[in-house]
Image (cartoon, helix red, strand yellow):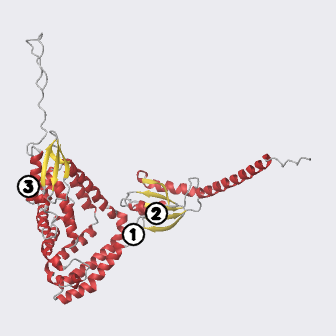
Amino acid sequence: MAFIPRWICLFGIAIVASAVGCSSDTSNPTAAATPKAPAAPATPAPLLKPDVPQTPEAAVQAVADGLRASKPVVVWDVLPATAQQSLDKLVSGLASGVDKEVWEHTAANLKKLATVLETKKEFIWASPIWKSGQVPKLDVVKPSWDPGVKLLRIIVDSELIDQQKMSAFDGREFMEGTGAKLLAQARVFSKTLKSDPLAMIETAKFTVTKQSDTSAKLKITLPDPKAKPIELGLMVVDGKWTCTQLNMGASLGGFFLQAYLDPFRPYQLIEWKGDYLKNMDRLSKILDNLQAAKTSQDFQKIVAGQLFGFALRMADQFGGKKPKRSEIQSMSWDRKANTAMVIVKGLHSFEEPTYHDLTKSLRAINPDKFRGPIEAEGSTLFFIGPEEAVFDKTLEAIKVGKIASKDKLRDTVTVELPTSLKDEKATAEAGAKSGEAAKSGEAAKSGEAAAKPKDAAPQSK
């Protein structure tokens, strides 16, 4: 339950930030000699659409009233159309980019967790963990339990855990439906906390100072006398008043969401998917056992014997220091699916017949989707694809050298060539430079000796 207050706090900050957003000349043929009458000035296009608040004060009030009524769609409506389209596309792309098995296993366990929290509340409250000092005291948790579990239930019963629906995300539809339910329940939950982070929806005061027909300043004053007022900018975009910081926040949120997708790149996913699915299967069985427990004693045995052990293993796995990603590993993980990576040991020159022939044959697989040579970590890399059946095509194309290893799962082949002229040249050049430096030093010493005058003979008295 500890994760929910932090999530609610972030949600509250986002809500408050959102609340701020809020004819041609014609001549007279009968009077050719008389001067033309000046043309009537063209009617300027209206700055604001007719169906939106016409003043910054009205726009802010509409957002504030909407949030107080738990209707977050008002936040969506103040976003410019371009920002709305960008967010719809971003969320849809993120959802469709997550591995299907990973999504389904995670969603299934979230549903099971919600059911256990709902139906085994008394057993959970009877756990000795509340007296361990490792978690908040039960008296603190109890008031928030039912509202928090209900919040989780709204999530697991919504489109948020349905990959197909999220892959066709519609922001306005979400805000009108699930978003409204979540905000309403989040406010109920927030009121059970010692410090209600969403109370600002009711208590914040807004002052608008209009600067021009297209810009204004908004000051948000919170009831806490120690809290500094928040000043934000308002401007007219796409025919409606919006908040500049809200638009920036939407872009920043998109950046963080994009970073979230990084572990789901095809070749990075391979490295952790198997272990993750095994862990999800273990957790699923534990949740099933907890749900099947008939007595508090049976429940506590499962918690102590299974759940705690699983939690400790997960803590070690995620809490341990992750090894630094190597240069080759980074390039491997950045590949699109069905892209072969050929690692040729050593650095090479096209003067080597085997290296020349290997490069030529690899390029021939698909000249338009070929990259290389790229030198990294003392090896030479080539990338081919995306291409259908690229791994088999790559193996067929390698006619020279020795295939040291091949990994079809990762579409990676390691090749050894008999020579490395580039390395030999570098060694020879280094040796030559060393020899030249030595000769130059000897010559310099010889010159110094020749230039040094001999000691003068002592004069006789």
Marks 3 and 1, the one that precedes in the sequence:
3
Residue 192 appears in which quarter of the rendering?
bottom left
Residue 232 visible = yes
Marks 2 and 1, the one that precedes in the sequence:
1
User: Which label lies toward us, 3 or 2?
Assistant: 3
Name the residue at 19% across, 62% down: 11
* Residue 2 located left or right of residue 457: left
Report how far apart the C-alphas of labels 3 and 2 lie in the structure: 65 Å
Amino acid type, callout 3 = Asp
Q: Residue furthest front?
A: 461
Name the residue at 24% across, 81% down: 286
Residue 170 visible = no
Residue 297 place in picture, x, y as percent: 19, 90
Residue 171 appears in which quarter of the rendering?
bottom left
* Residue 322 located left or right of residue 40: right
In the image, 410 versus 109, the foreground residue is 109
For residue 322, the mark is 1
In the image, 250 versus 34, the foreground residue is 250
Amino acid type, callout 1 = Lys
Residue 32 place in picture, x, y as percent: 11, 11
Question: Which residue is identified by label 2?
Answer: 395
Question: Which residue is identified by label 3?
Answer: 65
Q: Residue furthest top?
A: 33
User: What secondary structure is marked by label 2?
Assistant: helix
